[in-house]
Amino acid sequence: MSGETILVVDDEPKIVKNVRAYLEDAGFRVVVAGDGQLALTTFRHERPALVILDLGLPGMDGLDVARTLRRDSDVPLIMLTARVDETDRLIGLELGADDYITKPFSPRELVARVRAVLRRTQGDRTGAPPPLRAGEVQVDFERRQVTVTGELVELTPTEFDLLTVLARHPGRVFSRLELLDRVQGHTFDGYERTIDAHVKNLRQKLEPDPKDPRYILTVYGVGYKFADL
């Protein structure tokens, strides 16, 4: 993991300086961008292993940058936000953010989040279970690939990890907090609706009719389960 390139997108020089220092001290290579357009140009040139993206950018908004990144890539994405509006956080998660952290934050915590997301994405896959097939969905755990009716579906690292937890235990009901702990390793300060946003994304990508799901089922008042087909 050491030596991986991290793109930091923020227009506050003090934050960039601190984040860069801590990431470089942890062994990462850091490239920076102060606005959305430069972020996209830098991303295409550098192809970083992970992007740390501030939502409150001048000019091109961070959410628009995230939308563009997600059209072209499944790069792990951590969002920084000073916004307290729950809607902004949900939109960010629905756009495919793997994690988010609110300002002000500890640079050490951010480094820990970066390591955790990269570990999930690039971790050792030896001993992975055999591919799972449920209806038209097939999950290849070792390759971290999902197909629906034979077509490859692009999932973010967090979406894949969430699907893995559910699909490996068909019929078992997981609470939102349990899923947060298993997928993220922390609970976003109890922000359980994180899981709802990721489930919504998975349903859009996997279900024939996301409004009447066949695979990822809601257990009202409790959480979610994968259908025991």
Image (tube, rainbow, N blue to C red):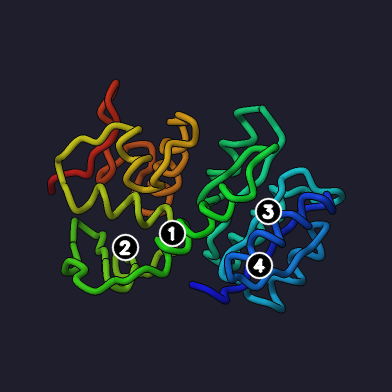
Residue where numbered disc 4 is placed: 24
**Which image quarter: residue 123?**
bottom left
State if disc 3 and disc 1 touch (CB < 8 Å): no
What is the C-alpha distance between the residues marked 1 and 2? 17 Å
Residue type at mark 4: give it.
Glu
Tag of residue 36: none
Answer with left or right where residue 183 lies relative to residue 16.
left
Task: Kindly state the secondary structure of the residue where label 3 is placed.
Answer: strand
Q: Residue at x 29, y 65 (%)?
A: 149
What is the C-alpha distance between the residues marked 4 and 3? 17 Å
- How many labels were placed on the picture? 4
Tag of residue 53: 3
In the image, residue 105 lies at what x, y percent? Answer: 65, 40
Residue type at mark 1: give it.
Pro
Q: Identify which residue, 208 or 34, lies in the foreground.
A: 34
In the image, residue 223 lies at what x, y percent? Answer: 29, 31
Residue where numbered disc 1 is placed: 157
Residue type at mark 2: give it.
Val
Tag of residue 148: 2
- Of the numbered discs 4 and 3, the one sitting upstream in the chain is 4
**Which image quarter: residue 66?**
bottom right
Residue type at mark 3: give it.
Leu
